[in-house]
Image (cartoon, grey):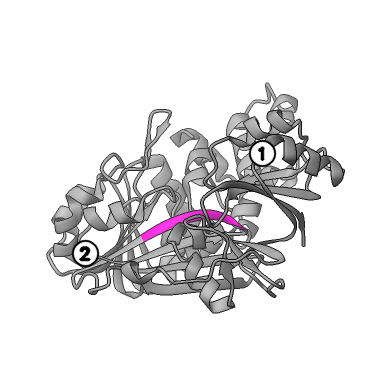
Amino acid sequence: MTHEEFAELQRPEILGCIEQYGNEDPDRFAMSRHGDEGIPVRAMAEQIACRQKALRKLPGLASHSLLYTSRALEQASGERAAASKSAYICGETLLDLSGGLGIDSIFMARRFSRVLYCERDEVLSSVAAYNFRTLGVGNIEVHCGDSVRYLETIPDNTLDWVYVDPDRRSGSRRHVSLELSSPDVTALHDLILAKSTAFCVKTSPMLDISEAARKLPSLERVLVVSVDGECKELLLFCTRSGPGSGGPLVEAICCYGDEQEVHIGPVPFRQRGRELPVAVGEWLLEPDPAILKAGLASVLGEQEELCRLNHGTGLLTGGAPRKNFPGRMFRIREIQPYKPALLKACLKKHGIDSASIQRRDFPLSVAELRRKFRLGESECHVLVFTRDASNALCCLVCERS
């Protein structure tokens, strides 16, 4: 989006047109209006596409006539995740070092008297400021420029919290490492804690928690957030007091639908392991991805009085399904050692020529397994390729609950 397009998009007649064609295919809209003078057709098509995505990602905010850029919307926190993280921090003043579209700033503004939003991109900071005004959020101050330089100008001990959502892209590549993200919070660690009592970093869900604890000595809490079964955010909360003797607290939040949230933890990092009996029950229970990422499957298993299927995969078993279990449940029909000839005979016996394939700690990929057993895709049957309690390869033939 250019400065000129941003100015044009704010015209009431342009906003009305975007609203009118909000359900149209953006490409079809652009083709049908190609050559129309006096309207920013490309920018309008982008807004139509973004609004359709925002209905899913930001269902509450999307009811307002907000403006977006495609990349900023893609990188922004979803509404459920933004609300979940904001519940963990509050105070007088927060600095958002990587403002972007401003979704996190909007939710943080409900928990702080004053939010300082920083963004170096002039157009994007203008879009965010427009959205703040549209929503009537009056306690966010917009600063356009280099956020680290702005941080350096702030007197020590001025801020309650700093929030950082580093850019993990470099060209077409995505990075997981904290050091390769911008800004590099490992390099800024001491500077941030001189200015603020605490800070929160949104990182890739693929980041190793142990690595984060090594590189951020002040890490006090780790929060893993999933939305409808997809791991969305791994959040690192750092404070001047730092972690306790058991290491940082680790917690998983699993969000389902509009309202339901399941919390597992917090548990000290070095105390997450629970001794569960190893057994195979009638049901296989796969914890939510946030619970698996947080390493809290055994904690959940202890709470639900479940057994573990094997070592290290987080798969649980039980004699009966669990109501409101945070994850997926499958009824086990048969367990087969991984011997291809025997497994093919088993699949033939059950009339299975297509299935959903899951793998945990198994050497073959899903694609390789499909080719090997000539299986199509189906949601009715589920084949779980993993290891048994003795570490031997096996396959669980299951059906959905």
Category of crowding for the residue at label 2, using alpha-carbon neighbours closer than 10 angstroms: few (below 14), some (14–19), many (at least 20): many
Residue under circle 1? 339
Q: Is residue 234 magenta?
A: yes
130 to 223, vertically: above or below: above
Residue 344 at x, y = what percent? 76, 37
Sequence-wise first label, 1 or 2: 2
Category of crowding for the residue at label 1, using alpha-carbon neighbours closer than 10 angstroms: few (below 14), some (14–19), many (at least 20): few
Residue 73 at x, y = what percent? 52, 46
Which residues are the magenta region? 229-235
- Horizontal arrangement in the rendering, residue 124 relative to residue 31 (left or right): left
- Horizontal arrangement in the rendering, residue 191 relative to residue 343 (left or right): left
Image point 70% across, 47% down: which residue? 383
The secondary element bearing badge 2 is classed as: loop
- Horizontal arrangement in the rendering, residue 85 relative to residue 229 (left or right): left
Separation of residues labelled 1 and 2 (CA atoms): 49 Å
Nearest the viewer among 169 and 11 is: 169
The image quadrant of residue 154 is bottom left
Residue 13 at x, y = what percent? 66, 44
Q: Is residue 189 magenta?
A: no
Residue under circle 2? 218
Image point 46% across, 66% down: which residue? 296
Of the two numbered discs 1 and 2 in the rendering, the one whose residue sits closer to the viewer: 1
Residue 158 at x, y = what percent? 18, 69
The image quadrant of residue 162 is bottom left
Residue 198, can we see it? Answer: yes
The secondary element bearing badge 1 is classed as: loop
The image quadrant of residue 18 is top right
- Horizontal arrangement in the rendering, residue 286 relative to residue 202 (left or right): right
Mark 1 belongs to which amino acid?
Answer: Lys
Residue 136, can we see it? Answer: no
Nearest the viewer among 314 and 150 is: 314
Mark 2 belongs to which amino acid?
Answer: Ser
